[in-house]
């Protein structure tokens, strides 16, 4: 009955089943939007692709926009968790800063310029995520400034803004190597004054 790897109810708890159906709806919707375009996807298509009835789909979401916003929030959460993992894997403060800037630049490179991205990059969940990202970068800059690896003549908030605005250029770059060069330029601008 399920078209896309839906779990069997008897294999999981009710809550796990609901979570799996929810995730399958999100994944199917994102795939349909990628294939057909944002304005072409209907709730009927999503139900069919997911392998559930329309009535069941409407128990989870009221419309396609609600599904996409939930999918996007899941993506953002995943990106922030990834950046936090990257921070934890690197060594000294400057290495952590560089690793996180590069990871964020690569995320921007992967998700640039789509109709879906333009539609979804609005709303409260994006504002909260931007604040979390800004806080992460500011904390890394503060640590690196305390060890003398980053300039301390400019406030960490301003430096974080500089980094994030400069990294916005990653979305228009053509390769991972270009992202790495961009990060090198950003880091050069963060060097302590001689």
Image (cartoon, rainbow, N blue to C red):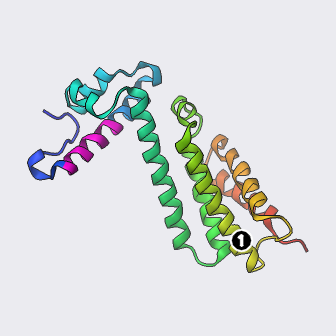
Residue beneath the point at 56% across and 73% down: 90
Residue beneath the point at 16% across and 48% down: 14
Regarding residue 17, the answer to whether it shows in the image is yes
Q: Position of residue 76 (x, y in %)?
A: 49, 48
The number of callouts visible is 1
Give the camera-side residue of 180 and 97: 97
Residue that sits furthest to the left in the current view = 10
Residue that sits furthest to the right in the current view = 194
Secondary structure state at the residue bearing disc 1:
helix
Q: Residues within 10 Å of mark 1 (few under 14, many from 20)?
A: many
The prevailing secondary structure element of the residues shown in magenta is helix
Q: Residue 146 occupies which quadrant of the picture?
A: bottom right
Q: Position of residue 20 (x, y in %)?
A: 25, 45
Boundaries of the magenta span: 15-27
Instruction: Name the residue carrying label 1.
Output: 142
Residue beneath the point at 86% across and 69% down: 153
Left or right: 9 as drawn, with respect to 126: left
């Amino acid at each position: 009955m399920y078209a896309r790897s839906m779990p069997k109810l008897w294999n999981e708890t009710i809550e796990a089943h609901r979570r799996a159906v929810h995730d399958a709806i999100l994944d199917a919707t994102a795939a349909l939007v990628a294939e057909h375009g944002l304005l072409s996807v209907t709730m009927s298509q999503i139900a069919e692709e997911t392998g559930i009835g329309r009535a069941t789909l409407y128990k989870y979401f009221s419309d396609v926009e609600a599904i996409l916003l939930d999918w996007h929030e899941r993506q953002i959460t995943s990106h922030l968790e990834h950046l936090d993992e990257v921070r934890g894997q690197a060594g000294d403060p400057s290495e952590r800063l560089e690793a996180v800037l590069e990871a964020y630049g690569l995320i921007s490179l992967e998700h640039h310029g789509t109709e879906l991205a333009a539609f979804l990059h609005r709303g409260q969940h994006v504002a909260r995520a931007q604040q979390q990202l800004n806080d992460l970068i500011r904390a890394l800059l503060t640590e690196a400034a305390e060890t003398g690896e980053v300039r301390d003549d400019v406030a960490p908030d301003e430096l974080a803004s500089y980094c994030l605005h400069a990294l916005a250029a990653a979305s228009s770059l053509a390769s991972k190597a270009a992202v790495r060069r961009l990060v090198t330029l950003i880091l050069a601008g963060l060097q302590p004054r001689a």
